[in-house]
Image (cartoon, rainbow, N blue to C red):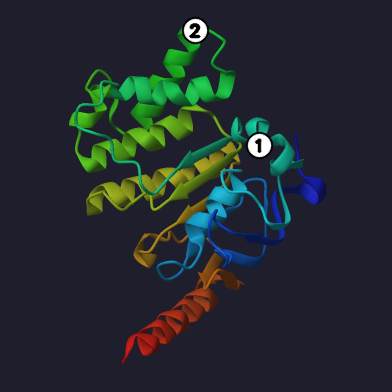
Amino acid sequence: MDGRDGKIIRVENVSTTYEGEKRPAIRGVNLALENGELVYLVGPNAAGKTTLLETINGLQPVSKGEVSVLGLDVRGHGSVVRKEIGYVPQDFMVEALEPYTALDVAMMGRYAKMGVLRRPEKEDFKKAMEALGLLGVEELACKPVGKLSGGQQQKVMISRALAKEPKVLLLDEPFSNLDPSSRQEVSALVCRLNEERKMATIVVTHDIRQIPERCRRIVVMNGGRIVADESPEKALAALESCQNIGAEEAVP
């Protein structure tokens, strides 16, 4: 599977409206990523960043426009597309009494890839353990995930996405629960895997300090729209403008 013109992700004039809402959460959004491209998505709160990731992943219905991943329209092929997408949502904290172990969670990525009707093989468990190892949490494989710290849970969730061996990686605030050292490690890992595995990768972050030097494209969202899709220098200037506007609107 591949997209036309080499575009792995293609979002064309897309608007998405949550059920029960009249105002679209994102409006007239256009975005395209090539194979192996790394994009950081930034913007103020409620800018539409999470909605855009959910729409690409087929979790929110498109009310206008078209979204294709690997050349497939997500509206008609959502289940097929999601087998090739590694997705880490922003809100994922696990209940303390959750019985699943860290390895169980990583294996969920394998099940999502192979389908629930196929029995896992040794290779599947090996891939899951390798994914935990990439995040440095393989020693937690047998620990109940609900008993882990927020940062450890976050690493396990990223491991689940990577165990899938995806062609597209969507990470929504993957650094939020990590300490500074872990943030640097995970940021470097995302860059390395993006380069090695040639995954089209979108990372949502509110912390521009986590944007690596290797990233040459930053997309800025504000008010449900993309307001800049530029090199880091130009995009960050646009982000500052968005934040200044938000501060002015907050003044009574």
> Secondary structure beneath disc 1?
helix
Q: Quadrant of the N terminus?
A: top right
Residue 196 in picture, x, y percent from top left:
55, 38
Residue 95 in picture, x, y percent from top left:
24, 34
Q: Quadrant of the C terminus?
A: bottom left
Residue 93 in picture, x, y percent from top left:
29, 40
Q: Residue furthest front?
A: 20
The answer to whether 43 is drawn above or below residue 184 in the figure is: below
Q: Residue furthest bottom?
A: 252
The answer to whether 212 is drawn above or below residue 115 in the figure is: below
Q: Is residue 224 left or right of residue 13?
A: left
Instruction: Identify the amino acid type marked 1.
Output: Gly
Residue 198 in picture, x, y percent from top left:
60, 41
Asked which quadrant contains residue 125, the reply is: top left
Q: Which residue is mark 1?
A: 78
Pick the residue in front: 202 or 194: 202
Q: Which residue is mark 2?
A: 121
> Secondary structure beneath disc 2?
loop
Mark sitting on residue 61: none
Residue drawn at 63 percent across, 67 percent down: 27
Does any portion of residue 196 appear in the rendered image? yes
The answer to whether 28 is drawn above or below residue 107 in the figure is: below
Residue drawn at 53 percent across, 65 percent down: 218
How far apart are the alpha carbons under marks 1 and 2? 26 Å
Residue drawn at 42 percent across, 71 percent down: 44
